[in-house]
Image (cartoon, grey):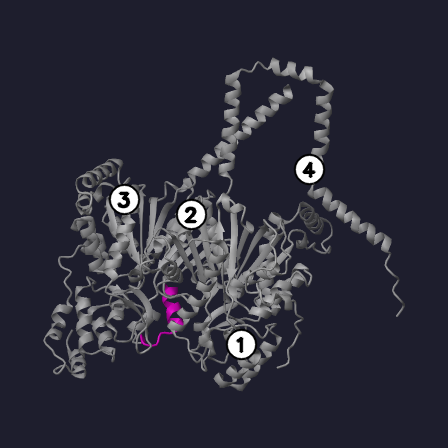
Amino acid sequence: MPAQPLPDFSTSVRLKYVKLGYQYLVNHFLTLLLIPMIATCVLELVRRGPEELISVYNSLDLDVIHILCSSFVIIFVLTVYYMSRPRPVYLVDYACFKPAPSCRVPFATFMEHTSMICEDPKSVQFQTRILERSGLGEETCLPPANHYIPPNPTMEAARAEAQLVIFSAIDDLIKKTGLQPKHIDILVVNCSLFSPTPSLSAMIVNKYKLRSNIKSFNLSGMGCSAGLLSIDLARDLLQVLPGSNALVISTEIITPNFYKGNRRDMLLPNCLFRMGAAAILLSNRRRDATRAKYRLLHVVRTHKGADDRAYRCVYQEEDSDGHCGISLSKDLMAIAGDALKSNITTIGPLVLPMSEQLLFFFTLVGRKLINPTLRPYIPDFKQAFEHFCIHAGGRAVIDELQKSLQLSAEHVEASRMTLHRFGNTSSSSLWYELNYIESKGRMKRGDRVWQIGFGSGFKCNSAVWKCLRTVKTPVDGPWAECIHRYPVDIPEIVKL
Amino acid sequence: MDVLTTLTIIFLLYSLYLLYKSYKLKCSRNCYLVDYVCFKPSPDRQITTRKCGEIIERNKNLGLAEYKFLLKVIVNSGIGERTYGPRNIIEGREESPTLDDAIEEMDEFLNVCIHDLFVKTKISPRDVDVLVVNISTFCPAPSLASRIVHRYNMRDDVKTYSLSSMGCSATLVAIDVVQNIFKSGKKSLAVVITSESISPNWYSGNDKSMMLGNCLFRCGGSAMLLTNDPAMQAQAKMRLKCLVRTHIGANDDAFNSAVQKEDDMGRVGVHLSKDLPKAAMRAFTENLKRLLPKILPYREIALIAFHIVKQKLVQPNAKLNKVVAQINFKSGVDHFCLHTGGTAVIDAVRQALRLSEFDVEPARMTLHRWGNTSASSIWYVLGYMEAKKRLKKKDRVLMISFGSGFKCNSCLWEVTRDLGDGDVWEDCIKEYPPKTIVNPYLDKYGWVNEETEETFNREERIEAFKNSPW
C-alpha cells in the first residue's frame, strides 16, 4: 500500500483558527456591535461640547413634576419587569447516601448467592456473563434483606432500607447546610418500585417533624429519570411560592424487587441495580444565592410513551411461573438514542451558542434545498457544557451516549466511575456523578452541567445547572474515602 | 432631539407592552374545572349482599369473632347493594392476585373513563399539556401515567406525574400540582386521573384492624379536565378559589393510624388503628384553622375575631369551644363534598360543622350507591349534587378529604354556570334518597348474635347458605 501523504498541517491549523474566529464573532455579535455604537456616541458628545449639552437640557423645560413622573414611570416599569421574571431556583447543596461496607456485594458474594438461590444453572451462567461485562466494581452495595439466602423481601425490611438510605442522606444534608426541618416548605420524594401506605414522604414528615402546612408529593413508578421529574415539580412550585425552599429525595428501594425467576430479560436488573439515595435542597430565596452551589437553568422532559416499542422497552410483568420482574428489551439502546435525539432538539436551542445553532441551521437548509447527501451536522455540545452527568444505567447506555454526543473519555468518566463504585442506583445516580466531579476538584464557578436521565415509559429528561461558586476539595460525601483511587481502568470483560 | 423623542416613545411602548403581558399572565392564573367524568364499572362487577356473604364465608381464616366483627361493620357501613368490586375478587381469586389482575382493573377504568372525558369535552389527547395520575396502592413500571400517554398517543412534551400512596386525599394533591403549574401563566390543559386499585390489596388474614379495608373499599374512579385558559371560561363548570393542605404526620399517633404492614402470619394489609378518628379530627381542625379565613366572608371573620377577643378578656384560660360553636360555616359555603370514608366519618364532619341532613345527603347517598371509592369519592358526591340540579352559578362548593399520613386536604370551588349534567347518576338519581338505607344483612345474618363459640359450625352454615332461596 502506498504511503499516505502527510496532511498539510498549515491549512488545517488555519482552518482551526477560522472556526475559532467564526465562533467568537457569532457568539459575541451583539457585544461587538456595541463597540462602534459606543465609540460614535462618545465622539458625538465630545464634538458637541459641554455648553451645547447644557443648553439642550435647559431647552427641555423640565420642572420637578416632569422629573418625578418620568422617574416614577421608569421605576414602576422596571419593578413590573423584574417581578414578572421567573424566580431563579438555586441548588443550595445536596447529599448522597454512603452505604456501609457491611452491605458490600463483591462479585464472589454475588455469584455464590446466585448459585445458591437460582435452580437453573443456565441463569447463573447468564448472570455471571452480565456481571463480567457490566462495568460494576467490587464495592457496590445491596440492602441487608438481599444478603439473606434466599432474600427476605418483607415489607418491614423494605421500610427499613427506605429509612436507612433516606434518613442518612437527609441527616448529611442537614449537617452540610444547617437546614432546620421546620423550615422546609416543599417535599418531593420519588421512589419507583416501593410505595407503602403511608407514603415515604409521610415517613419523612413524621421522622423530622415537618410543619403541617408542608406541600408534600410522593411520585412513584416513574423510573430512573424520576429524579429530574421531581426537580421539575419542585421548580414549578418554587416559581409560585415566594421565599421558599424544597427538599427533593431521589431513591430506589431494592428490597422488594428481587426477581426470583429465570427469564433472562428480567435477570438484568438483579445484576445492575444497587442501593443509593440522594437528598437535594432547592431554594428561591435571594439570601441563599450567595451560599448556593448551582442555579437551575433548564429542565426539558421528553416522553416517548406514544410509541409502542418505547413503551414496552422497560416493562414490569409476571413470568410464566408468576414471578414479578422488570424486563428490559433488546431495543433499549436504540430507543434511548431516539429519546435523546428528541430531547436534544428541544434543549439545543436553549443552551447551544449561536455559532453552533447557525451551523446546524445552514447544514439543515443545505441538506433540504441543495444537496441531500450532505452529512448532518451534529452540534458540538461540548461548547455548551463543561460537565456531563449521564445516568449510569449500564455500560451500554454510557457507550451509546458517548458515541452519539461525540464526547471524550473524560466527559463520561464521572458516569463510568459511578457505575463502577456504586452500580446503577437509579434516579440518584446523577447526584453521585456530580459529587464525583466535585470531589475531583473539576467544578469551577461558571461551569455548566448537563444531567441526562432515562427511565421507563420511555422518558428522557435533562437538567442544566450553572455552578455559582468553585467547589473546594476535599468534598465530604460518598466519594470522600475512595476518590484518590479513581479513575480506574475498567476492562471490557472481568473474568470471574 | 428627534432621537431622544423616538427613544422615549419606543421605551414607553415597550413598557406598555410589558404591563399588558403581566396583566395577561395574571388572568391566566385561574384554575378552571372544564368537566369531569366518573367511572361506572360494568354491571357484572356489582357486589351485592349475597356476594359479600359468599366472599366472607370463603375465607377459611375467619372464626366466629371475625364474622361478628365483619357483619357489625357491614351493617353499619351505609353501603348499598350496587357497589362494584374487581373481577378477581368476584371470581374467587382474591387470595392470589396477579399483576395482570391489577392491570386489567386499571385498564377497564382508563380505557372507558378517559375516553368519555375527551369525547365530552371535545378535546384531543394531543392537546393535553399536563397529566397527573393518582392511584394510591398500585405503582407498576412503566407508571400508569405512561400507560395513559401510550394508550391515547399523547405528545412527547407532556408533563406527567404519577402520585402514589397519598391516601384518599390524593385527588386534591393532584389538583395542587396542576394549580401550581397553571400559576406560571402559560396556557395549558391538564388532565387529572384519580382511582384506587383494589385487586392486589385484598387482606386475607384475620387481624380485625386490617379487615376494615376489605369491607369498605369499592371500585371507582374519575377523570377531570382543568385549564387556565380564560377562553375556556364559558365552557368551564367551576373555578378553584383556594386549596389548603394539612399534614400532621409529625404526630406519631396520627402517622401510625393507617399503616400498611404484615400481620403475624406475614400477610400484607392496611392496619387502621383506634386513633384514626382522633387523628382525623385533629387534622381537620388544623385544616379549618387555615381554611376558614380564606372562605368565610369578612363579616363572619370579624364576628369570630370579636368573640375570641371578648372571651380572652373575660376568661383568658377557657377553651374556645363556645366561640367555635358560634361559627356559621354555611356563610361561606353552599355545598359540602365530603369524602365518603364511612358513616362514622360523615357523621363526625356533620357534627363538627353543624350541617343539616340535606347538606350531607350527597355524601351519604354516594356511600350507599358507590361505597368508599377512596380519592375519587368526592367527585361522585359532586356528581350527585349536579344530577339533583343543586349547583347554580356563583354557588361555592367545599371539598374535604382525609388520607393516610395523616392528611386533611380541602378546597373551595366557585360554580361558574348552572349545572345539570347527570353523568353516572343519570340512571338512578330518581331513586335517591331512598326511603331506608338499613342493610338487609340485619335480617339474614342476625343469627350471628345468637351463636357462641361452642354452637358455631362453619361448614353447617355454608351448607345452609348455599341451600337458601336468597
Using the image, name the chain to which the residue with label 2 belongs: B
In the rendered structure, which amino acid carries the disc numbered 4? Thr
Q: Which residue is mark 2?
A: B180
Look at the picture and state if A21 lies above or below B255. above
Where is residue A175 drawn, in percent x and y?
A: 48, 58
Q: Which residues are magenta?
A: B93-108
In the rendered structure, which amino acid carries the disc numbered 3? Leu
Label pair 2/1, CB-CB below 8 angstroms: no
B271 on left or right of A13: left
Where is residue B417 drawn, in percent x and y?
A: 31, 41
Question: Label 4, label 2: how many angstroms apart (C-alpha)?
Answer: 38 Å
Q: Which mark is residue B292?
A: 3
Residue shown at the point (31%, 45%) measured from the top left: B413
Look at the picture and state if A390 lies above or below A317. above
Give the label, 2 or 1, closer to the camera.
1
| Mark 4 residue crowding within 10 angstroms, few (<14) / some (14–19) / many (20+) | few
Residues at discs 4 and 2 both on one chain: no
In the image, residue B94 lies in the stretch drawn in magenta = yes
Give the label, 1 or 4, closer to the camera.
1
In the rendered structure, which amino acid carries the disc numbered 1? Val
Give the label, 2 or 3, closer to the camera.
3
Nearer the observer, B6 or A424: A424
Q: Which mark is residue A31?
A: 4
Residue shown at the point (12%, 79%) measured from the top left: B452
In the rendered structure, which amino acid carries the disc numbered 2? Asn
Q: Which residue is mark 1?
A: A105
Q: Secondary structure at mark 4?
A: helix
Using the image, name the chain to which the residue with label 4 belongs: A
In the image, residue B98 lies in the stretch drawn in magenta = yes
Give the label, 1 or 3, closer to the camera.
1
